[in-house]
Image (tube, rainbow, N blue to C red):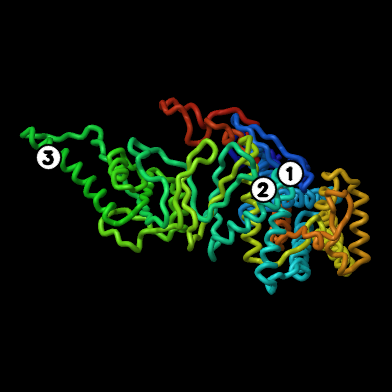
Amino acid sequence: MSQFMRPNIILLKEGTDASQGKGQIISNINACQAVVSIVKTTLGPRGMDKLIESNGETTITNDGATVMKKLNICHPAAKILVDIAKAQDNEVGDGTTSVVVLAGELLKEAKTFLEDGLVGPQIIKGFRMACHLSLTKLQDIAVDLREKTDEDKRDMLIKCAETTLNSKLVADYKVFFAKMSVDAVSMLGEDLAVSAVGIKKVSGGSVMETMLIDGVAFKKTFSYAGFEQQPKKFTNPKILLLNLELELKAEKDNAEVRLTDPDQYQSIVDAEWNIIYEKLDLIAKSGANVVLSRLAIGDLATQYFADRDIFCAGRVDQDDLERMRRATGGEVQTTVQGIQTNVLGTCGEFEEKQVGAERYNLFMQCSNTKTATILLRGGAQQFIDEAARSLNDSIMIVRRAMRNTKVVGGGGAIEMELSRFLREYARSIAGKQQLVINYFAKALEVIPMTLAQNSGADGTLVLNQLRQKHALNGLAGRWIGVDCTECSVTDCFANYIWEPVVVKESAISAATEAACLVLSIDETVTNPKSEQPNQGPMKGKGKGMGKGGMKGKGRGARVLKR
């Protein structure tokens, strides 16, 4: 009788929903599988595109990270896949779809184990062991091109960029854009900062009219009267970069100036003009031919510079100004007092040029440049946006390949070789881990299987051919992968389908960690009120009536009996 007299202990707030146990893990896996099924068809050179409409904006893409971001996934476990796609995109630029598909396949295999009664920690242990073995094997079989000549290294970079662009919307122009990506990254200096490559999208014209500027290009900024009188072309100009306002400032709101004599007002006006003219005189004496400022350059300053054959542009974007600094060797000044010649930048040629419907300021032939700009042309805006994303992936891959010269065969070849290796290793150990590692090896085969299916081939037939080649040919067969064009198998390395080893390392590591993370979650606690935009502990009507954020109907408090 005493057990019915024990008081209840309330742990969570009213309306809180909690789900736990094996059923919850399987529910999370099912949510992840739903996401994977969306992006799976985008994998490979014959993958399909996705048209996503969000907030009135239409996006056409087959980039895994972009698709995941645009889907606005709200399931807490499925968001993990969004995070690994973003991480892969930020880290190496390519393999965003592969990492999501691989993580989904690992969870699919784990679901079978869970339903058969194997606990999550055992599966996680096996997956991590298989991941470690895969990464070690990956380094062993990768081909290092470090000792090659500069010409061979350039060819390697171009092949890696072409492999990335194979699955993009601009695949028909992969040779053109691959060379452009390599040339752009080659200009960046030792730090290889991605932000130093500017991609400017200009509607109209052919894709082949895309230009690579060995310096900086940006759209003509807002200008005042007198701008058209300024020269629009210089050879070896001196360039002054400013973060300074060059216009007469308006009085602040509610400012009050008390005068005892009308002449005092004129003295105030004269002082303002003297200040601005002093700044302009100092700039003219510095010898600068081009003046760029982060802040506004007013009509007075514009006409002043026009009278002295000086070009000026105000309200220059911060990123463009930083690229100007890297390209010209100048330094951004916050004052015009004491300007030295060593803070002025220079370039081989400056020109304001009409590109499509816009006018662009081009700073070219920068001898010591550490930046580059790509003027991307094309027809529809959606095509240009997708081409920009493709170029960004290509540039990221080239940048990574420059730092890590090891490459592996693409087309699912490396996944098949790792799968074969793990199957052989699994036969040498005993216990439950043997089964888990064996299924990890099976999950790796999802990449060549999906490539074949998306190409219209018989996935099972191609996969069986790959297994045979990798099993019988030994070291010579390690680069046999899927030929998406002929719907058969081919030597991917001999056909220059190369990928930097860092792409596969990052994809396998991220996919394994994501799968382990989902498998380690055995309880999900959700407060429905926190998901409502106008609800929450700090929200309410604010009228002292005690209504609002803390009131609502729920499923009841969670109660634990002693």
Q: Position of residue 34 (x, y in %)?
A: 76, 40
Read off the residue under disc 1.
Answer: 32
Amino acid at the residue labelled 1: Cys
Mark 1 or mark 3: whose residue is earlier in sequence: 1
Amino acid at the residue labelled 2: Ile
Residue 49 versus residue 152 in the image, above or below: above
Q: Nearest to the eye among marks 1 and 3: give it.
A: 3
Task: Look at 58% across and 56% down and name the residue there.
Answer: 184
Cα distance in 3D space between marks 2 and 1: 9 Å
Read off the residue under disc 2.
Answer: 80
Crowd band around label 1 with a 10 angstrom C-alpha radius: few (<14), some (14–19), many (20+): many
Point out the residue furthest to the bottom here: 147
Q: Position of residue 437 (x, y in %)?
A: 83, 61
Q: Secondary structure at mark 3?
A: helix
In terms of depth relative to the viewer, which is nearer, 491 or 237? 237
Residue 99 versus residue 249 in the image, above or below: below
Amino acid at the residue labelled 3: Ser
Read off the residue under disc 3.
Answer: 267
Mark 2–mark 1 contact, CB under 8 Å? Answer: yes
Q: Position of residue 505 (x, y in %)?
A: 71, 61
Q: Secondary structure at mark 2?
A: helix
Cα distance in 3D space between marks 1 and 3: 72 Å
